[in-house]
Amino acid sequence: MSIQNTPVAEIESIVKAQRVYFASNETLDRKFRKLQLKKLQKALKEWEKPLCDALWTDLHKSYEEAIMTELSIVSGEIKNHLSHLRGWMRSRCVCTPLKMMPSRSRVVSEPLGNALIISPWNYPVQLLLNPLVGAISSGCTAILKPSPYVPNVSRVIEEMIKATFDQRYIAVVQGNRDVNAALLEQRFDIIFFTGSPSLGRKVMAAAAKNLTPVVLELGGKSPCIVDKDADIEIAARRIAWGKTLNAGQTCIAPDYLLIHRSRENEFVEAFRKALVRLHGTDIKASKHYVRLVNDKAFERVSGYIKNGNVALGGWYDAKERYIEPTLLKDVSPDSPVMQEEIFGPVLPMLPFDDRNEAIEFIRKREKPLALYYFGKVKHGKEVIRLTSAGGSCINDTIMHIANENLPFGGVGNSGMGHYHGRLSFDAFSHKRAVVTTPTLLDLPFRYMPYKMFDLVKKLL
């Protein structure tokens, strides 16, 4: 099936209706926000099977993986917001300096207003609905734009949202990049975009016309270091899991491997065994091994295999868009596989002799969304201190995204802004400074002609 573009006139009508609805102040009340979160929570349960079926149809994503990496994450986010919304909405008192006495100071969280959320295809449920939780809890309205590359998932989400929410409050707009362009012509109070750095730049340029704040969750080439003293069996298993999860179509998947030269051959064999444990001897037959999203993605990723010598894997089936997990060796840093985010199950290996070589290699490139290190913890901490990345794990991959108490977001080329947990609420909120000054006492020092200025100067 294919997705039809929402007409521009309809988009304009939805944006106008949501502006009117937000101006009604309906979304400001805490009880209203909690009710909407509970509606979304209930909808996720009721639509679980259609969503999981659609994920299987579009991506060959198993029920277990759909629950673990998509629906459960959104459900957990909702529970977190329901538990803490009262405290997050409460104004926060801050210290007032002596020079401002007897005033009192506090910070108030207010919703930014009308939000636009644009999501990619690789985790089409989680990456669309998780930001929505933040928009709801903060008191915003939202227009959701799912990816046309997963048409069945996008259709089910649209049906679910229509059955759950008033379109003046939350609506779904469908279509290709022409629809994205039409949406970005509209004025929003915040744009939340998840996708590639190249598209992120276009979103930011469009937002700049109206000085609209943006949260950009992008990607990039996330390095994984396997040092001389790493536990190779553990490293191979956790890297194989992180790289084959969603067939590598994960923004924080290990993108390339910097491995100590003395452990390279050992790692290849350990990786082979890890794949068997994860997916069996016939990976293609595994129900937990996802396919590439479309022919264009398949051709791009399979083309990377010729950028080095195959150390493991390398087989693919164009008809099914299946690519076997592949390790590449003898890869040039200047080859195409080392220029753009791979977003697939191909893992190039670049050997190093000294840890500082690996650190320097990373520092010369754009800041990644994730960085992983396997080896002694003290060395991992040193690598993190000397590099910059959106998030990191020592002796693990992917798992930093699973803790809603940790910020998730990029830095530099890999994005800006953070979300998850309290930070999702904050992402769609404005922190408003409020000073309250009593009228019973009105000290004259601040008024012209500034009498007793020598005393005032000491207080400044």
Image (cartoon, helix red, strand yellow):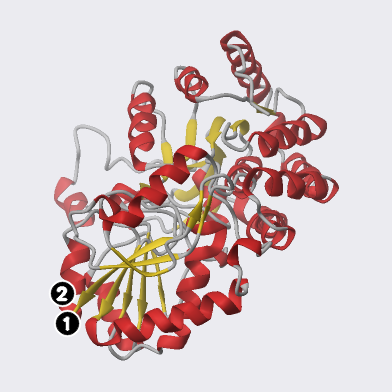
| Image quadrant where residue 374 sits | bottom left
Q: Position of residue 222 (x, y in %)?
A: 35, 61
Residue under the image location 14 percent in, 50 percent down: 454
Residue under the image location 49 percent in, 17 percent down: 182
Q: Position of residue 86 (x, y in %)?
A: 68, 54
Residue located farthest toward the top when viewing the structure as drawn: 9
User: Around disc 2, counting alpha carbons within 10 Å, would you say few (fewer than 14), some (14 to 19), or many (20 or more)?
Assistant: few
Question: Which quadrant: the N terminus?
Answer: top right
Give 360 or 451, whichever is nearer the viewer: 360
Picture disc at residue 353: 1
Alpha carbons under labels 2 and 1: distance apart: 7 Å
Q: Position of residue 228 (x, y in %)?
A: 27, 88
| Image quadrant where residue 110 sits | top right
Q: Is residue 211 above or below residue 359?
A: above
Q: Is residue 95 above or below residue 239?
A: above
As helix, strand or loop, the secondary structure at mark 1 comes to loop
Give 357 or 278, whichever is nearer the viewer: 278
Horizontally, residue 21 falls left or right of residue 244, namely right
Q: How many marks?
A: 2
- Three-letter residue code for mark 2: Glu
As helix, strand or loop, the secondary structure at mark 2 comes to helix
- Three-letter residue code for mark 1: Asp
Residue under the image location 16 percent in, 59 percent down: 364
Picture disc at residue 309: none
Q: Position of residue 287 (x, y in %)?
A: 69, 61
Instruction: Please say whether residue 433 is visible from this viewpoint.
Output: no
Residue located farthest toward the right when viewing the structure as drawn: 46
Instruction: Please say whether residue 8 is visible from this viewpoint.
Output: yes
Which residue is the site of mark 2? Answer: 357
Give 343 or 326, whichever is nearer the viewer: 326
Of circles 2 and 1, the one toward us is 1
Residue under the image location 71 percent in, 59 percent down: 67
